[in-house]
Image (cartoon, helix red, strand yellow):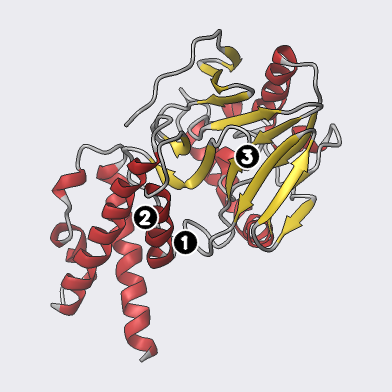
Amino acid sequence: MVLGWIAGTGIAFADDANFRQIAPGVYAAIAPNEAPSPGNRGFVSNLGFIVGRSGVVAIGTGANEKAGRLMLESIHRLTRKPVVLAVNLQATPDHVLGNASFARRGIPILAHRETDRFMVYNCPNCIRNARSAIGDRRMGKASIVRPTRIVDASVVESAGGVDIEIRHDGHTFQPGSLVVVDRRSGIVFAGEVLSVDRVPDVRNADLETWRAVLERLAALPDGQVVPAHGAVSAPRVAACLASYLTDLSRKVGEIYERGVAMQDAAREAALPDYQGWQLYSTMHASNIHFTFLKAEARDLAH
């Protein structure tokens, strides 16, 4: 079930990006559900913030330094309360490359230790790939600014009168992927743990753990979940992504056991039920490749 916006004026922070209220004091900017391009300037990951009694917690920082700055300006136009914390839910360029704009203002940035490690080793290449997709001029400044607060497990955090649960349920989309729950509204910011109507990138994922987390998310009572990609939705939509991961793992396992060569795997492991999802034509083939490699690695380990 896709939920409609609560009535209110959108707060623009970058071209067609608008923050809209989805619950009292909780805002989200829903990105185009597409790949990075010059047209979207890398704004392809949903962002959000939560307003508390005395401060604001930001969820994500944007795809470059300008996006981070404009996000902060938008928050300031909506509320005079200061941003007191930013949370990096995972290490993807569309989510963390605005960190510099937050750090420059002395705002703490929280992430899991594995996300910090992933940023150090992978973000230089992520920046190069993003520049290639978006273009130097539209990308603007983008640099690796590491989180300043590290967590190793699930914690409850209070900042600026915002009480949130920061959940780490193991290696899902990435080893350090987090989910944030606003305790006041029950809104879940799922980050890359959840995409709606979009084929995810599984190259760094643990499919079994990820699928189990999605099934638990889908079992939650009705509420609102903000995914990394796609519309704000009811929790049960997570079952669709869990089904994709199940079908991907099963199909690749079948063709591997049959001895199908890797170069033929993409043809043999098509999943027509998901052809209508965004990025199917490119990302599903990539997912087959990496899932096949992991099956091969497990086989060789025995």
Amino acid type shown at disc 1:
Asn
Element class at badge 3:
loop
Residue 28 located left or right of residue 3: right
Residue underneath mark 2? 215
Residue underneath mark 3? 183
Q: Earlier in the sequence, mark 3 or mark 2?
A: 3
Nearer the observer: mark 3 or 2; the answer is: 3
Q: Residue at x 14, y 47 (%)?
A: 272
Q: Quadrant of residue 189?
A: top right
Q: Residue at x 43, y 57 (%)?
A: 213
Q: Residues within 10 Å of mark 3 (few under 14, many from 20)?
A: few
Q: Earlier in the sequence, mark 2 or mark 1?
A: 1
Amino acid type shown at disc 3:
Arg
Instruction: In the rendered view, tell whether residue 47 sits above or below residue 166.
Output: above
- Expressed as whole percent of the image width and height from the top left, the position of residue 164 reads 67, 42
Residue underneath mark 1? 204
Nearer the observer: mark 2 or 1; the answer is: 2
Mark 3 and mark 2: Cα distance apart in space: 21 Å
> Would residue 111 be seen by someone viewing this image from the given angle?
no
Residue 281 located left or right of residue 156: left
Of the 4 image quadrants, the one containing the C terminus is: bottom left
Q: Residue at x 48, y 25 (%)?
A: 40
Q: Residues within 10 Å of mark 2 (few under 14, many from 20)?
A: some
Instruction: In the rendered view, tell whether residue 79 sits above or below residue 51.
Output: above
- Expressed as whole percent of the image width and height from the top left, the position of residue 177 reads 56, 54
Amino acid type shown at disc 2:
Glu
